[in-house]
Amino acid sequence: MTEIDLRAGIRYLSRRDVERLAVSASEIADRLETLLVAERAGDAWDAPKSTIAPGDGRLSLALLSAARQPSLSVLKTLGVSPDNAARGLPHIGGVIVVHDGASGLPIAILDAEHITAVRTAAISLIAARRLARVESSSIGFIGCGVQAHSHLDALASELPIEHVVAFSRRRESAEALRAHARTAGIAGRVVDDAGDAMTAVDVVVSSIPQQPGLRPFLDANQLDPGAFAIGVDLGRSWIPETFSAFDRIAVDDLRRHATAPLVTTVPLNTDVVTLIGELPRTDPDARTAFMFGGIGLGDLAAASICLDRARDLGVGAMLER
């Protein structure tokens, strides 16, 4: 972390600014692994997510995290509305406010849309480094929105991905993901049934947004032996009674899982910090899964890298205090 001039004002980074900085999921994953280990040592902190649900699928969320190194605290606020697609707007919108750890003064405001997409994929990447087979070459996507695009980029950066299968309630979303894959030299096909996106693939990513009346519809028994499933949607789209088909399931934090379980039908004993201390898996036939609801320290990891790069490149507008 480069030295901060607290008298220089507050740096504002728009979505275009953040995208221009081109911070990768791999970079965020590397820094986040360090922060998660620091958290267990008492040198970083990640408060439970705060959520308000006014109804009709709308949500207001806040995530707070801090660390001794880099000496920062980060607050991200998000708004979610399932009706935004009809408005021609993103499903999620938010900002990240970064404070200097020593003085407590705010030093930056960052648009959160791009960071949320990439840092969420970075969290999945940490799990994939240990739970996916290193030779994994195909991904099935259940849901083809922003998270599907960011997860494709992240996973393809560290796994030898050659083929993508896309399923979405909106076929145009699936076609868009296939086109995105094609630009990276990855073949793809669109299917009309979720089950067809789960079979004969090495990795499955589900990112179905919360919506009124949603019922779980993914059966883990349909996964091939050796497959790795990533539940970006907190596992809400997976039929709970089929979780016994997994040989191993990890969550973001077992301590929080104990008070607000993501999985209740089978016992769990693995979280991200446990995984960080492990080598890549060696069992070629085990079905594995990672179910998570987000890690606030991921925002701190991403924001700190963005700010370092923005200062070095002179990106962003300076606002008066």
Image: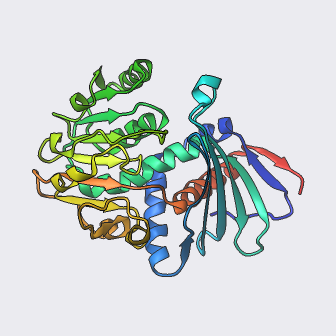
Quadrant of residue 103 within the rendered picture: bottom right
Q: Number of labelled discs?
A: 0
The answer to whether one can see residue 21 in this image is: no
The residue drawn where x is 66% and y is 35% is 16
Residue 13 in the figure: left or right of residue 291: right
Q: Residue at x 63, y 29 (%)?
A: 89
Query: Residue 166 is drawn in which quadrant?
Result: top left
Residue 182: image x %, image y %?
A: 36, 21
Q: Is residue 119 left or right of residue 262?
A: right
Residue furthest right in the image? 320
In the picture, the quarter occupied by the N terminus is bottom right
Q: Is residue 41 above or below residue 232?
A: below
Asked if 164 appears above or below 132 in the picture, the reply is above
Vertical relation: 257 (above or below) 91: below
The residue positioned 43% from the left and 64% from the top of the image is 33
Vertical order, 53 against 214 (above or below): below
